[in-house]
Every structure is written in C-alpha cells, then in structure tokens.
Image (cartoon, rainbow, N blue to C red):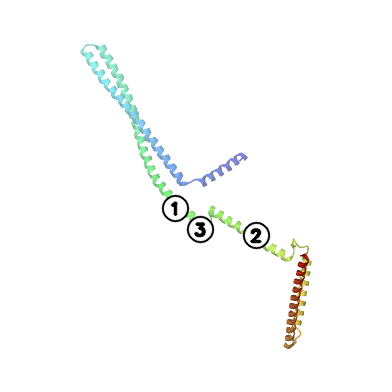
Amino acid sequence: MGVLSRLSYVVRSKINAALNRAEDPSETLDYSYEQMRDELQEVKQGIADLTTQKKRLEMQKRRLEENVEKHNEQARQAVNQDREDLARRALEKKKQKMNQIEDLESQIASLQSTQDDLVDKKDQLQNRIEEFRTKKESMKARYEAAEAQTRVSEAMTGAGDEMEDVGRAIERAEERTEDMEARSEAMDELQESGVFDDALSDKDSLDRELEDVRTSGEVDAELETLKTEMGKGSGSSDAGSADEDVDLEAELETETESETADKDIEAELEELKDDDES
C-alpha cells in the first residue's frame, strides 16, 4: 500500500468515525422511511402514467373498430351498386384498420401486464413501508430509552463527556489549591527560619538571634533582681517584706510630692514670662 493510499484510508476512517459519532439513529430511520415513501409515490405515479397510456390506446382501438364497421358498410353499399372497385377499396381500408387494431391490442396487453406487475410491486412496497414504520417507531423508542439510561448512568458514574470536564475542573482546582497551600507553608517556614530578611531592617538573622538572646538574658537578670528585692529569692521573713512595702510606698509618695513641686515651679515661670511680654 502506497503512501497516498494509506493516507486516503486514514482520512476515510476518520471521516467514518466522525459520522458514526454524529449519526442519530432516529434521524436515519426517519430519513429512510421518507425515502421509501418517495419511492412508493414514484411507483404510484408510474402506474398512473402507464394506465393513462393504456387508456389512450384503448380509445384509439375503439375508433379503429368504428372505422372497421364503417368500411364494412361502405363495401356492402358498393356491392349493392355493382361497384366492385369501391367495395375493394373499402375492404382494403378495413383490413388496414384491423391490422392496426391487432397492434393496439398487443400494446394494450403488454401495458396491462406491466401495470399488473407495478400494482403488485406497489402493494408489496406499501406493506414493507408499513412494516418498516412499525419497526422504526419501535427502534426509536428503544434508542431513546437506551440513550436516557446511558445519560443517567454516565451522570451517576461520572463517565460522560460533561462529567469528565467537571472532574477535570475539580482536579485543576484541587491542584491549584494544594500549590497555594504548599507555597504559603513554605513562605511561613522561610520567614521563621530568617531566610527572608525584613526589608525595613539592616539586621541579618544572626544579629536578630543574638539580640533575642541578649534581651532574654537581661529580662532574666532583672527578674532575679526583682525577686531578690521582694524577698522571693533570698527566703527573708514576712516582716522584712512588710518593711520593704512601707519603704516602697514612702518612695512613691516622695516622687509624687516632687512632681507636684515641679509643676508649681513651671507655673510660676510661665507667669513671669507673661509679665515680661506685657
């Protein structure tokens, strides 16, 4: 098989496959039924034309038969008048008409036979069309039922073309969602590990870790100092703690009095400033 032959075979195969997928059995059956009805109509038209032609020959035969009787009467009249020549001419014409009648009878018989055959074929074709119509309706009902059942089954199993598209859309959405979730977790992990430095800070990850350690140490030292001052760490008595509370309150009162005195001094200075300006 040559290249062109193989290519032609492949093209025909593709076209046939596409036509098979696009073919609707219901439409095909309806089209075939209409074609058969058209053929039946053509047969009926042929029978009508044939019958018309036969009727014309029969009319022509009747006219010839009338002429035969006429020529026969003419021959009788000529014999009565002792005109054998006229009688002979009338009989010759009668013979011609009778020969034509025989030919017409042969043609009419042939047309009648053809008409009878066509009528039989018409009846057979009409019976076939009626049988085909019954089968067609039955096949259409079966196909529609099978098609509906197939659509339901495809919808339930997700095997149909539309459900396949929906499944693909869901898969793509799940993939994109998983990608975004993975990217978000990766960004959080990188940010926590310090791989991505703060864009507004000139410190690197090592500087931030040292600063965190230093801050934590200072907080711990201050906490120990506070605990020692409050007697939590040295195990001093409650009396000592009470004295320290009294001292703390005295210091707070002193600070309050100092702040009040500072405010009085600031007020006097403002008054002196206003007097100078006036």
- Residue 49 locus on image (x, y percent): 36, 31
Return the residue at label 1.
145
Q: Alpha-carbon neighbours of circle 2 within 10 Å: few (<14), some, or many (≥20)?
A: few
Helix, strand or loop at mark 1: helix
For the residue pair 268 and 138, the one nearer the viewer reads as 268
- Image vertical order of residue 216 relative to residue 128, above or below: below
Residue 167 position, x and y percent, is 57, 56
- Residue 259 versus residue 175 in the image, above or below: below
Viewer can see residue 231:
no
What amino acid is found at the position of numbered circle 1 in the picture? Answer: Ala
Mark 1 or 2, closer to the camera: 2
Q: Dot 3 corresponds to which residue? A: 156
Instruction: Quadrant for residue 32, please give it.
Output: top left
User: Contact, CB < 8 Å: mark 1 with mark 2?
Assistant: no
Residue type highlighted by circle 3 = Met
Q: Nearer the viewer, residue 244 or 99?
A: 244
Mark 1 and 3 residues: CB-CB less than 8 Å, in contact?
Answer: no
Foreground tag (1 vs 3): 3
Q: Is residue 29 left or right of residue 256?
A: left
Mark 2 = which residue? 180
182, 245: nearer the viewer? 245
Direction from residue 160 to residue 75 in the image, left or right: left
Which marked residue is nearer to the observer: mark 3 or mark 2? 2
The structure residue drawn at horizontal position 37% and vertical position 40%, both measured from the top left corner, is 126
In this view, 173 is above or below 248: above
Kind of residue at badge 2:
Met
Task: Name the quarter where the C terminus is drawn.
Answer: bottom right
Q: Is residue 255 left or right of residue 73?
A: right
* Precedes in sequence: disc 3 or disc 2: 3
Q: Residue at x 63, y 60 (%)?
A: 178
